[in-house]
Amino acid sequence: MRLPRRRPGGLTRWDVWSSPAPVLTIILIVELVAVGTLAASLRHGVGPLPSSWLLTLAVLVGAGIVSTEASLGVERVRRQSDETPHIDLSSVWTFAAAALLPAPLAVAVAVLIYSHIYARVWRRSGVPPHRALFSAATVVLAVEAAAAVMRLSEPTALFRTVGGLLTVLAALLVYAAVNMVLVVGVIVLSGPNRRFTSFLQVLAHGDDAVLEFATLSMGALAACAMASFGAAYALLVLPPLIVLHRTVLVRQLEEAASTDGKTGLLNAAAWHTQAGQALRRIEREGAHATVLVLDLDHFKQVNDQYGHLVGDQVLAAVAEAVRAEVRDGDLVGRFGGEEFVVLLPGLDGEEGHPGAEAVAERIRRRIRGLRVDIAAPVGQEVIDHLSVSIGGAMMPVDGTELTQLLEVADAAMYCAKHAGRNTVRMGLTGFPGPVGGHRPRRSPPRHP
């Protein structure tokens, strides 16, 4: 797993030096510990070497280089199209090295493979050296930890007994924990929400966790085949690994197609599709839900005064504020322009209504308190006094179809506008009179 890329610079201009103190401290500690543990293991000696250690090392490094070269185009597109952290599939070879070689030699495999990845992929994709160094340091620690666990079992029993299998599984878990926890910890500390819940949310990202364990499992199978039948059997892992690379890219591109590029939220079509599916499931279960429509007040003035680039920055800040006030399972999307939509499953009905309105009020207050720092010709400026008008519709009180709920929430939002803006109106009860006069909402675009 690696950190998102940033713009490179000279040694003294690396943006790592301007990182928050906790982030910089963790990065330096991780790198020093990686070097220190490697030096300590070298002082104690490599120990008895397997009979074919040189062939094993050469095959693992060669296989790592071949897999990188075979997936070069895919990996560059993958890294260039995604600024978020993602799983590095080279752990197939580094985990196999931890299982088959003494720790110093396994670290040598990792260093050689990651040096090649940096030269061929990371540097050309704009990954600065300090981020590559930190990513490599986390892998070194993961390899050393996994190798230490592997040594708890006799080499002859490692791939042949139930106890050996349990040792391999323990090493797999340790490798994943060390690598992912360190990287995710730095990412969370670098972000605006430095909370333990944010750490758990990023760490428990389902697809990434599954991919990490799948990759490490392939590494365990490669090690087992090499130990049982010979080093050349590692080559059998190459075809499925290359296919896995391409499968991951397809999934990543699908996610990009459903994401709004300015805010990172679901785009209109993706939100409409997922919200419709969720409402049908909620209706079958006899449960409740609330749809919120949010519209930034006087947003055109921001674009007119500061330009559209600053307007995009404000939209991103508002999107982050909305995400911070809803649950993980709630659907948040950008419906176009300065409009946002939220689906809140389980917050509706006579008892649930105050809960949904409370969420809307929290969003309104958070946006009202936003301060967005922007670069101006005369220095830094702050955009504040933002506000939002929010309308809500409750299922089944205001309808059971998504289109109905959007119409009611849209009308309620316009009532909030007419009531002076920076306010919340919920459902048909939020209208001072008969529903009417509001702009009908266009159906969102659908995927072809």
Image (cartoon, rainbow, N blue to C red):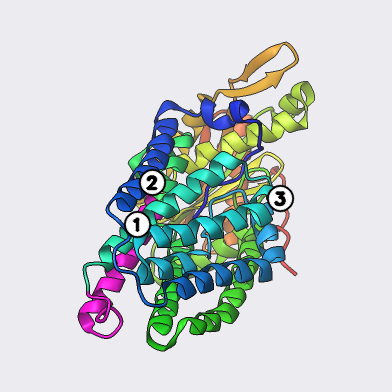
Q: Which of 192 and 81 is in front in this view?
A: 81
Residue drawn 42% across the image and 35% down it = 28
Residue on which the image places disc 2: 34
- CA separation in Å, label 2 and label 1: 9 Å
Residue 92 x %, y %: 48, 69
Q: Can you tell which of label 1 and label 3 is closer to the viewer?
A: 1
Residue 112 x %, y %: 54, 58
Give residue 179's quadrant in the image: bottom left
Q: Is residue 346 above or below residue 5?
A: below
- Disc 1 is placed on an element classified as helix
Residue on which the image places disc 3: 124
Q: Is residue 347 above or below residue 242?
A: above
Q: Which mark is residue 348?
A: none
Asked if the residue under mark 1 is in contact with the one under mark 2, i.e. CB atoms within 8 Å, the reply is yes
- Disc 3 is placed on an element classified as helix
Q: Which mark is residue 144?
A: 1
Q: Which of 395 and 154 is in front in this view?
A: 154
Looking at numbered disc 1 in the image, what kind of residue is underneath it? Glu
Looking at numbered disc 3 in the image, what kind of residue is underneath it? Arg
Q: Does the magenta stretch include residue 170?
A: yes
